[in-house]
Amino acid sequence: MRILVVSLYFPPDMGAPAGRFYDYARQWIRRGHSVTVITGLPHFPAGIIHDEYRGVFYRRETLDGIDVRRCWLLSARRRSLAKALNYGSFLISSILCVLFAPIQYDVVVATSPPPTVGISGVVASWRRRVPLVFDIRDIWPEAIVQSGRLTNPLLIRLFEGTAHFIYRSAARVTAVTEGWVERLREIGVPNEKLAALPNGVDVRAFDSQAEEPLPAALDILDPEACWFTYAGIFNTPQGLEVILEAAALLRDREPVEYHKAQFVFVGEGPTHDVLEERSRELGLDRVVFIPRQPRAAIFGLLRRSFAVIVSLRPRKDTSTVPSKIYESLASSRPVLFSAGGEGAETIRQAGGGVVCSPGDPEPLFSAILDYLKDPDRALSDGASGRRYVEAHYDRSRIADEFAELLEGFECPSANPPKRA
């Protein structure tokens, strides 16, 4: 099949959508399909277009056999209006790409957030009269209404109408958790359209990349310390302040153990400066901030860490499962999970770490201290988590399930022609 993916984010962007569909595309190519991705210029999560793409309106590239079409967009940092312009500009440029770029395809996959990619997917579906699969990791506008970022009733109804239009237009709707599938049923999406395809980690790729030498940027880490690592996006929903507060508790109550540890933050995002300032205010000399690193460096760092920390702010939605927990479990290191919902249940079932109340530094401090005093338990929990993710969340297997869903559609061309 010739598969067209519409995604606002794609490597070198960070985050779940970029990594997920990069892994999927490579696996689909191994199955004999061709994959074209319409995406934006790299800019996430910092909201700044990478230097090599400044001034670019459209660029075609090949990445590991994937035909990548990068479209212009307005970059966005913190403000809601800028985000709206970011989403709207990519909506326009991606539709223009669909209409005028010579791309042949048999099926369309549009992956949200943002949900506006679904409109581009609908246009692509109509353009070639092929099926659309709408893939979601958040139910909009519910997600932004619950966060308090959207309160205008007219806009809420507009976005709800848009979402339902996309659901009606799609041949299938996939979600990454069973909780979201159930919610989609509740709001009227027919059961026969729905499928749960969880996030995961490409275990084989993780292992091969984790063995690469660490980059020079990580030389500032104390090689004798026990690294407690957070790697990902620095933004408000992550609630990363709880890690700093737990580190301060460890310093004040257990100074000997505190000096055995080093708290490593790797990544970028809108709250980076706030976190650095908070660390200085607390006087935390065992906290290190490292800029965004390549994927292989992140995998290598996780593998060499003592433990991995994943946090989220308290939230009403219990269906959210941060995709980084799968990479964390694959590292064979225990996961300190300061969050709730389905993600917490995953950690418990895996036996791969400790679940702490979100937003509360006390249980996180206790879990950190327990592992420092019992490193054998840390090794045992890490090994359990690794076995669990291999058995249940290997992304290559999930990608095959997704491919089988796509292969279930009638394909007009058994042998795809060369791409223009």
Image (cartoon, rainbow, N blue to C red):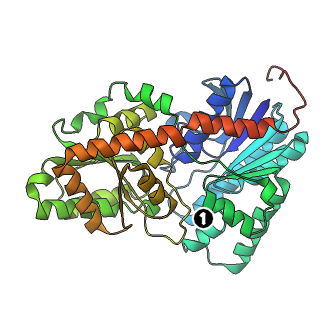
Is residue 12 shown to the viewer in this render?
A: yes
Is residue 306 shown to the viewer in this render?
A: no
Q: Residues within 10 Å of mark 1 (few under 14, many from 20)?
A: few
Mark 1 belongs to which amino acid? Leu
Image coords of residue 153 (percent x, y): 70, 80
- Left or right: 159 as drawn, with respect to 198: right
Residue in the picture at 57% in, 46% down: 199
- In which quadrant will I find the C terminus? top right
Which residue in the protein does label 1 denote?
A: 81
Residue in the picture at 37% in, 55% down: 272
Residue in the picture at 40% in, 44% down: 385
Q: In the figure, residue 332 lies in which quadrant?
A: top left
Image coords of residue 213 (percent x, y): 33, 25
Q: In the figure, residue 185 lies in which quadrant?
A: bottom right
Residue in the picture at 22% in, 37% down: 220
Residue in the foreground of this view, choosing between 352 and 215: 352
Helix, strand or loop for disc 1: helix
Image coords of residue 164 (percent x, y): 79, 64
Number of marks: 1
Image coords of residue 403 (percent x, y): 72, 36
